[in-house]
Amino acid sequence: MTTALVTHDACLGHDPGPGHPERIGRLSVVLAALDEERFPKLMRENAPRATAEQIGRVHDRGYVEQLLELEVTEGEHLALDADTVLSSGSVEAALRAAGGAIRAVDLVMAGRANAAFAAVRPPGHHAEPARGMGFCLFNNVAIAAQHARDRWGVTRIAVADFDVHHGNGTQAAFWDDDDLFFASSHQSPFYPGTGGAEDSGASGNIVNAPLPSGTGTKEFRDAWQRDLLPAIDEFAPEMLLISAGFDGHARDPLAQFLLETDDFGWLTRELVALATHHCRGRVISLLEGGYDLVALAECAADHVKALEWARDG
């Protein structure tokens, strides 16, 4: 079996403007790092547009309609908040990002790939049901989870989120559903101010590991080995989704973790092992943060190499 790479050129059309960290170059360097010469076995797929109906299974209809009706003139920008800025190509990019998450699920569930990586932007894990925020418009990973339920009848789904920022939107979408599990490590106190260890969801289906500024390899790996990986193992998911943010790297300008490239490869291999044990190797990863371009390219390449370990259980 193989690993699929899902992306679309439209995701390069989202341009929040000069100086914005969530810049076009983020996706460009990831795709360059995953080029065919270095990854000849990757199955390469274009992301379709997600439909309003698919997005509306996670997000409030009014929010979806408002976003889809926005018109931004070429060369101008529209700010949803201080961090979340739209250009003329942003809504199309967001539709393709959500659609890429959906296509990744379909490829894995149809048996065409064991694992899939959706290299898309804008990212998604901060987007709450009724609003976008934190660079995010639609919550791609939550949309993927809901699609797996609706289209494929998957019941128990876990999301592992190792972005340095807490995935408040995913937590909010999963909070009341005991068949959806969310495990997150993140810097705290830090944006967006959520993700305390006491946040456990309506039925213990949320496990957060808030970690202080300066967290390095040992503390990061200890948190996953002690708390988060065992919690996912106990939940025994039928599908494992990953919110893959690489902004915990020591070179990243937006955070104060001190992780190295190999930390992300190590964790990915641990998650693939869980997916092999519980999910017949079915693991889908989606690009979230990562704002130093050199570190992002290195980490994404190591992450996809580790995904290629996925095998039928």
Image (cartoon, rainbow, N blue to C red):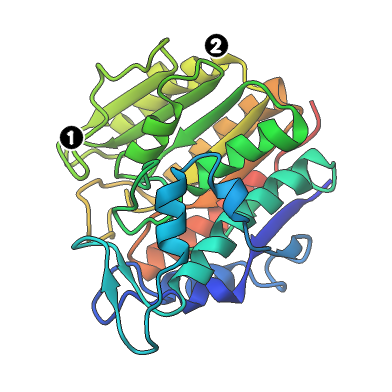
Label 1 and label 2: CA atoms lie apart by 26 Å
Q: Nearer the viewer, residue 196 or 124?
A: 124
Q: Position of residue 152 (x, y in %)?
A: 76, 33
Q: Residue at x 27, y 62 (%)?
A: 80
Q: Quadrant of the C terminus?
A: top right
Q: Residue at x 25, y 29 (%)?
A: 210
Horizontally, residue 42 falls left or right of residue 30, namely right
Horizontally, residue 178 falls left or right of residue 9, namely left
The reply to whether residue 122 is in sight is: no
Q: Which residue is mark 1?
A: 212
Q: Position of residue 255 (x, y in %)?
A: 22, 52
- Amino acid type assigned to the residue bearing label 1 in the image: Pro
Q: Nearer the viewer, residue 92 or 224?
A: 92
Question: Quarter-wise, where is residue 295 in the image?
Answer: bottom left
> Few, some or many C-alpha atoms within 10 Å of disc 2 (few <14, some 14-19, many ≥20)?
few
Q: Position of residue 66 (x, y in %)?
A: 40, 59
Horizontally, residue 101 falls left or right of residue 194, namely right
- Compared to residue 223, the image places residue 25 above or below, namely below
> Few, some or many C-alpha atoms within 10 Å of disc 1 (few <14, some 14-19, many ≥20)?
some
Nearer the N terminus, badge 1 or badge 2?
1
Q: Secondary structure at mark 2?
A: helix
- Compared to residue 3, the image places residue 28 above or below, namely below
Residue 234 is marked as 2
How many discs appear?
A: 2
Residue 101 is marked as none
Question: Quarter-wise, where is residue 235 in the image?
Answer: top right
The reply to whether residue 170 is in sight is: yes
Q: Quadrant of the N terminus?
A: top right
Q: Residue at x 50, y 76 (%)?
A: 12
